[in-house]
Amino acid sequence: MLATAAFALPLPAGAQRQGPQPALPTTQLSAGIHIIRAEVANTDATRRDGLMFRRELPGNDGMLFVFEQPDVQCFWMRNTLLPLSIAFIADDGTIVNIEDMAPQTEDPHCAKKPVRYALEMSQGWFKQHGIAAGKKLDGLP
């Protein structure tokens, strides 16, 4: 079953957000020695808006998408101005796959198996830090 990340779905006419959503509560994750400060998108509304319209994503900042149950989550980049990399993460923290995503495109990027988490970081962040599929992240909610 293919689930599309909520931020990829259009809003009713007149309800489309035209700017970035306010900063969300954060959590700290770790990938080996690397500490990540991730905003947590865990509702339909926050997942729908994600990082749309943001103009920067500094250093080790990212956005963690949390879903109620594992599924083959898919994302696209409509209204997202920044190039991003996304890690699809299993319940135990293991990265299933990582995809690079081009700004303002509607190409789907999907988990290779059902996952409950997805972490978006600046494009290339995972590669630059030696983090690949099979590595584990700690601190997931």
Image (tube, rainbow, N blue to C red):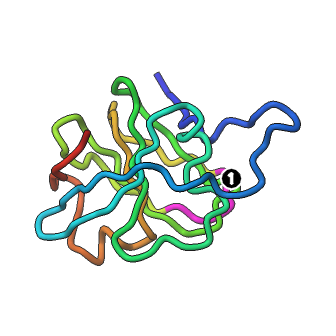
Report the side of 66 relative to 129 (left or right): right
Relative horizontal placement of residue 91, taking residue 110 as reference (left or right): left
Local secondary structure at mark 1: loop
| Residue at point 50%, 27% (across, down) | 2
Front one among 86 and 55: 55
Q: Is residue 46 magenta?
A: no
- Residue drawn 60% across and 40% down? 48
Q: Which residue is mark 1?
A: 78
Q: Identify the residue at image location x=34%, y=27%.
A: 70
Quarter containing the C terminus = top left
- Specify few, some or many for label 1: CA neighbours under 10 Å numbering under 14, 14-19, or 20 or more: some
Image position, residue 9 (x, y; %): 67, 36
Report which quarter residue 53 is drawn in.
bottom right
Task: Provide the residue span drawn in magenta.
Answer: 101-106
Q: Is residue 82 left or right of residue 112?
A: right
> What residue type is disc 1 on?
Arg
